[in-house]
Image: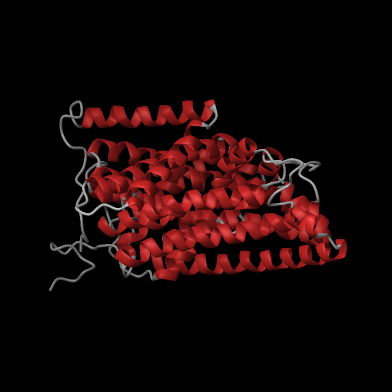
Amino acid sequence: MADVETHAAGQPRLARALGLWDLVFYGIVLIQPVAPMGIYGVVSEQARGHVVTTILIGMVAMLLTAVSYGRMAAVYPSAGSAFTFVGGELHASLGYATGWSMVMDYVLNPMICTIWCSKAAMNVVHGVPYPVWVLLFAALFTGLNLRGVKASARTNEVLTLVMGAVLVIFLGAAFRYIVHLNPGATELTRPFYDPATFSLPLVLTGASIASLTYIGFDGISTLAEEAVDPKRDILRATVLTCLITGVLASIQVYAAQLVWGTWTGFPDVDTAFVHVAGKAGGPVLFMLVNIALMIANIGSGTGAHLGAARLLYGMGRSGALPPRFFAAIDPRSRIPRNNVLLIGVVAGAGGLVLSYQLGAEMLNFGAFIAFMGVNLAAFTRYWVRAERRSAGNFVYPLLGFAFCAYLWVSLRTPAKIAGGTWLAAGLIYGAIKTAGFRRNLASFDEGNPD
């Protein structure tokens, strides 16, 4: 019997080294356990203090999409993620368009993490120019992923533990502060529902923003070919990641709302959570949370770098991108080395010219296209083509699609223009490659490629 880690012709394959909790750690670090800290102030003002409610609504919506991802990964246990799912179930051209949008999504994630980390580092170490920090962080993300997937998984576990420790410290300080305030029953329930400020339309708008807390969970499916048991663990890890993220996020923002006491008056809305930490624990906690957020972005950038390299590998192997470059596997480390290096170069270059705001908005453009596509793929697979149909197989993916479509439509115009330009460029490339889409762009094989 041929070695499962090689092609029949003896070419190296991706190594199956990741267990369930490796996948969960990867997903949590990619999302960031402290993800709601960055959007806390914006959501608080939009939803008039009902941040916990928006996080919980977002968790339910993302769990629907997570189930679709997990179920499709059981059918297509390969490294292409939404690209493979949509192409295999709907149409190869749609899969290509989804994959092209995801390339923007995955490439932008390490890029905006590079930007954020560079600016945060300038606040800690003065005198080092911004471009130097950009190149250093881009090189750091690249170097961590060149060590091999198992080493990257161990890095994710360490980062998760560090951020978990900071969360514990913050929650401890917040608990002491809240006990000192001695709030009554009304104050304790106000973060969930405040009759004086509650507005369902505003809360739903806030939930569309708060759902950004969960973006990144789909990266787990790009590691299906490196999972020990992809048919079981990808679904479990994806759902567990969304659930754990939602619980942690709810606890954080609930404590923050009780500490601050109102939904307005932040010195800076974008960094509101840092000021909450300073109010709860003083200057030391203020600085600690700043450092934790930088660590979180390092973990997220490294994880996104890994996912982007695997996505390009999946597209290269199926023929959507030139396979000689994108489908090449380093025989020693068993990773798509060319793709890791390419993403590093793009992250460094983009960090020098792109703003953080536009990069984040463009990331959402690609992410929601992928989410919509995967939900439609799951609906097609488990309802349209299924021999036995159930209400859940009809309702869940359609609800997931509707919610993601709402988020996508609500993106700001500059992100739509930039994202649409990227998508148009990809479609032009695909049309040239296939003589006007008269030939298939790629192949999409069901089942374990091993």
Q: Nearer the viewer, residue 67 or 234?
A: 67
Considering depth in this image, is 370 or 1 the residue closer to the camera?
370
Task: Please say if 13 is above or below 135.
Answer: below
Residue at horizontal 46 percent and vertical 65 percent from the top: 24
Where on the picture, by quarter, is residue 422?
top left
Q: Position of residue 10 (x, y in %)?
A: 16, 64
Q: Position of residue 40 (x, y in %)?
A: 67, 47
- Horizontal side of 391 relative to 265 (left or right) equals left
Which residue is rendered at x = 51% and y = 39% of the image? Answer: 350
* Left or right: where 387 falls relative to 26: left
Q: 286 or 342, which is in the foreground?
A: 286
* Residue 177 image position (x, y, % from top left): 83, 63
| Residue at the (51%, 30%) spot, across then down | 415
Is residue 324 shown to the viewer in this render?
A: no
From this view, report whether residue 425 is shown above or below residue 277: above
> Which image quadrant for residue 172?
bottom right
**Which coloring applies here?**
secondary structure
